[in-house]
Amino acid sequence: MKNKIVALCSIMLFVLIFGMVAHVQGARVAGTWVMTNKGGDGVVTTLTLTQDGITLRGTMQSENGAETPIDDGNMSGNNITFTVTRPGQNKVEYKGTVDGETMKGTFIQGENSVEWTAKRS
């Protein structure tokens, strides 16, 4: 009986630890995403991400083809954050959530909060 209890406790501990690791690592976002800003001009950009655990790297490519690297990319569960510094502009912080093949969030442009959505390409 004691061995069964030890075995059951070991299995429960394994499941708990596995669940915690999966939650901390967060969603899988590596790949190409088509992002649309819901601002006045509805800008479409391509977001290309690589992921190493919770660390994100990649680029944003504008409609005119200019690529800008993302910085400080991070995942926490289904929450995503990263920054982009375009030439001649301030650093822009993007925050959002991932839900399977879609993401949505906001960034601050000037004094305005702009909504964005992205779909896996």
Image: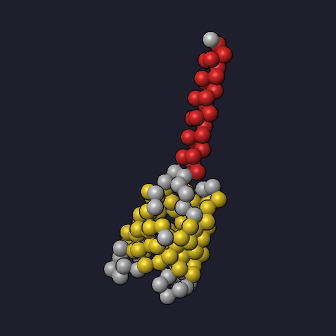
Q: Is residue 28 above or below residue 106?
A: above
What residue is shown at x 57% (from left), y 41% (from top)? 20
Of residues 55 and 5, the one drawn nearer to the viewer in this rendering = 5
Q: In the displayed image of the protein, which residue is found farthest to the top?
A: 1
Among the 4 quarters of the image, the one containing residue 39 = bottom left
Q: In the displayed image of the protein, which residue is found farthest to the bottom?
A: 64
Where in the figure is residue 58, as x and y percent of width and height? 60, 71
Tell me if residue 16 can be seen: yes
Where in the figure is residue 33, as x and y percent of width and height? 49, 70
On screen, residue 70 versus residue 120, left or right, reads right
The N terminus - image quarter? top right
On screen, residue 110 versus residue 28, left or right, reads left
Colour style of the rendered protein structure = secondary structure
Q: In the displayed image of the protein, which residue is found farthest to the left?
A: 40
What residue is shown at x 55% (from left), y 57% (from top)? 28
What residue is shown at x 57% (from left), y 46% (from top)? 22
Among the 4 quarters of the image, the one containing residue 53 = bottom right
Q: Is residue 22 above or below residue 47?
A: above
Where in the figure is residue 46, as x and y percent of width and height? 50, 76
Where in the figure is residue 121, as x and y percent of width and height? 49, 70
The number of discs equals 0
Among the 4 quarters of the image, the one containing residue 3 = top right
